Amino acid sequence: MGQSTMSSPRKDKLSALPFVSAVRLALLGLISSFIITPAFALDEAAVLERMVDIYSQNLECGENPEVPAWQRNAITNSNDGYRARYSRFGCTIGERGSIVVFPGRGEGSFEYYETAIDFIDRGFGPVYVIDHRGQGLSPRLLADHHKGHVANFEDYVDDALVFVDTVKIDLAELGAGPNPVMYLTSNSMGGAVGIGLLQRLGPDNPFRAAALLGPMINVNYHSFSGTPANWFYLRLYSESGALMQARWRCGIASYWNDQRCEEYAAKSAANGYVPDTRRFVENTQAIMTHSKARYELRTHMMDRFDWSQIAEDEYTRDENWSGPQLGGATNGWVLAAARFNRQMRKPGSLEKMAHIPIMLLTGSEDLRAYNPYAEWRDRKPDLSRHTEFCDDLNSISLASIGANSCQFVSLVGGYHELYKERDFERNKALDTVDWFFRFHAEM
């Protein structure tokens, strides 16, 4: 039999991605002109005071019709019994479906409250945000609460699988039906977890589309090294260098020190998280945002918000959690992350996710995404690892389903934390994600 030439709506939309990429700015500008600013959307000057007040209210469903509730829940991974946490923002299903969020390394689900409010005002809801194991609101994996550690990166994916199944059950209880409309978005490390989940689920994934912001496509040396961003160190501490160093520390070096793999990978992080040391410095890529207000909001939640009642009410005595503060990554985390990144980029892995529309949205000044040696012979920021990921995925999707599945978008001037950027870059990011989800609203 000859192959059918009939196209599906999903395939037609995937095929349109190259054209869409070429005209995206014009389309975005046109669409944005018709998008009314959400009623709740905060001006940056009001973010700190307003969000601190909202957090302190600890709202339940129905308590304040103007602000979505913040509910915290637990899931249990049957593989090892680990109880990860997640937050649900909002209590009703939005007309455009629900959103699942995978945060970056060190982030807690609570940090996406403002972003959840923005998505809910745009017609989505509820917004579900996981706390990856060992960080945020989830119990710590080591006695030192400040160490960012994981033994196997697949553990994050296992937790995510349980989380998504839990979300589907919750949506059914809210009346969404058997096939709820769901979208995935992420930040940084959460992008790698999301990619791993999509590859694990294959065609059975429940998402219409996935928007991955500043995704961790490879382990940048800044993830574990405080060395200057010059030409020599960027090669020494490339992903290969990171992997070699982590293998040494978690392998041979552990014969002399059996705790070596659980030690901080960067000497600069040796003291863990130190309260009252976070300082905002304007126009500094390492700060990862231009927004002083949103940076200081995170500082407030880490240093001054009282977590004691939540710890007492929501955690058992044997759960290793006293607050969301987290320091640097361990050698074990670097080893697990580098190995996972290499595996997820292989053609056989990419083929498993070739069917779903993917957008990689990256700030053009994202320190975590590119080799930051612009000062070396006046080189511009290098986002090639993200563009190459899309190119590799598209070559596979073209061969398997006859359409491009991945679109790369660079947001000019944006740093790493696009959902926590100043209003100018953040609103562009929200509009771009909104538009991408709108474009793929139909299966």
Image (cartoon, rainbow, N blue to C red):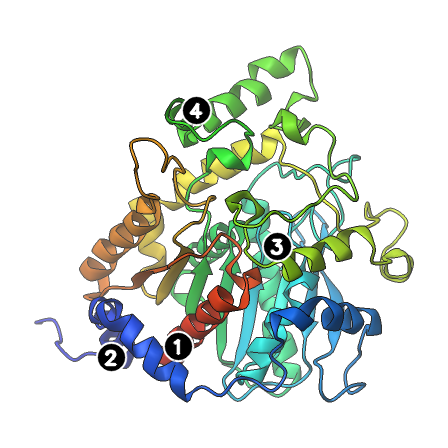
| Lower sequence index among marks 1 and 3 | 3
**Residue 256: percent from left, percent from top:** 66, 10
User: Label 1 to label 3, Cα distance in Å?
Assistant: 29 Å
- In the picture of the structure, the residue carrying the numbered disc 2 is 8
Q: Amino acid at mark 4?
A: Tyr
Sequence order check: which comes first, mark 4 or mark 1?
4
Residue type indicated by callout 1? Trp
- Mark 4–mark 1 Cα distance, whole angstroms, equals 39 Å
Disc on the earlier residue, 3 or 2 = 2
Residue 211 higher or lower than 435, as above or below: above
Outermost residue, front side: 282
Kindly give the residue lying farthest to the top in the view shown.
Answer: 256
Q: Of discs 2 and 1, which sits in the foreground?
A: 1
Compared to residue 182, the image places residue 187 above or below, namely above
Q: Nearer the viewer, residue 32 or 91?
A: 32
Query: Label 2: few (<14), some or many (≥20) within 10 Å?
Result: few
| Residue matched to label 1 | 435
SS class, disc 3: helix
Kindly check if marks 1 and 3 are in contact, taking CB atoms under 8 A apart as contact. Answer: no
Amino acid type at circle 2 is Ser
Discs 4/3, front: 4
The residue that disc 4 covers is 233
- As drawn, the label of residue 353 is none
Q: Position of residue 180 (x, y in %)?
A: 52, 81
Q: Is residue 29 left or right of residue 228?
A: left
Q: How far apart are labels 4 and 3 at the CA level?
A: 35 Å
Q: Quadrant of the C terminus?
A: bottom left
Q: Amino acid at mark 3?
A: Asp
Residue 309's spot in the image, x, y percent?
A: 91, 61
* Quarter of image, res 12: bottom left
